[in-house]
Image: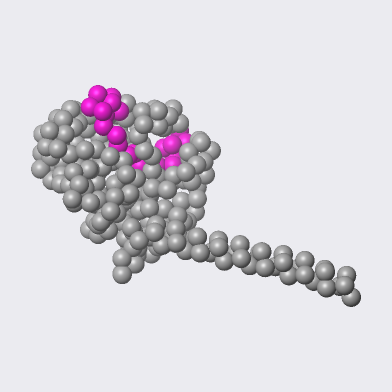
Amino acid sequence: MTFFYTIKLKHAKRYFIIIVCTILAITILAINGGNHLSVFSSQDGPVGLAKGNEKNEDVSLTFNVTWGDQMLEPILDQLNEHDVQATFFLLGEWAEHHPHLIELIDKAGHEIGMLGYRYKSYLDLDNSDIVKDLHRAKDVFNKLGYTDLNLLRTPSGHLDEEVLTIAVNQGYDVIQWRVNSNDWKAPGIDNIVEEVISETKNGDIILMHASDSAIQTAKALELILPTLKEKGFKFVSVSELISQADIETDPVE
């Protein structure tokens, strides 16, 4: 009988440890998950980050890259010349064909986020296809050695509640913008400069492009970067903007 109760006691101890560890794990996940989602959720559900803290003069300059290999390096040169850190949102399909350019972005100290794999509006995809697109993009970046990417901008910035919920459940912070340079339309250097400088306010996320359609962007940056600095703005990564308190979560319309 002594042997019987000894075995039972060992089993009970093992089960107790397993139960305690499980409770601790669930508690930690709940706490961390709550902190994470508190930045990107509202009473109406998950939302995309469009703006940081209005009390700080920090702004985030972001670039979408979906195709081409000619415009990125001149833009990187401007960022380097003016000592500005930016966040680049890269399409998975583009990344597969341009690993050397991703390396340039990374080595220059800029932050990297994802645009999914194919540049197709998530509003036109079934939920399962959205998940597949995200997984395929993640696989590409993992193979290239970028295994900790959690910033996501959806193709064309198209969002609804379902898309946001899927992205959040996949572990991504969905990033929008408030200032749109429309530089990909090549509206003229002066127009790009005027739009960005006149619209940028504290905590803003600025959208620009580094695809080959952005033929006027590097020249525009020659004026935009020093002018915004003179106005007192400080350029920070999106992740740094996220880390600040009192972040607004209103999605861009």
* Residue at 26% over, 32% down: 84
Image quadrant occupied by the N terminus: bottom right
Q: Does residue 176 show up? A: no
* Residue at 50% over, 50% down: 135
Image quadrant occupied by the C terminus: bottom left
The image shows residue 127, relative to residue 55, as above or below, that is: below
Closer to the camera, 23 or 231?
23
Magenta span: 76-97
Q: Does residue 174 show up? A: yes
Q: Is 79 one of the magenta-colored residues?
A: yes
Quarter of the view holding residue 82: top left
Quarter of the view holding residue 149: top left
Percent position of residue 162, x then y:
38, 64
The image shows residue 133, relative to residue 68, as above or below, that is: below
Percent position of residue 115, x then y:
38, 46
Percent position of residue 62, x then y:
28, 41
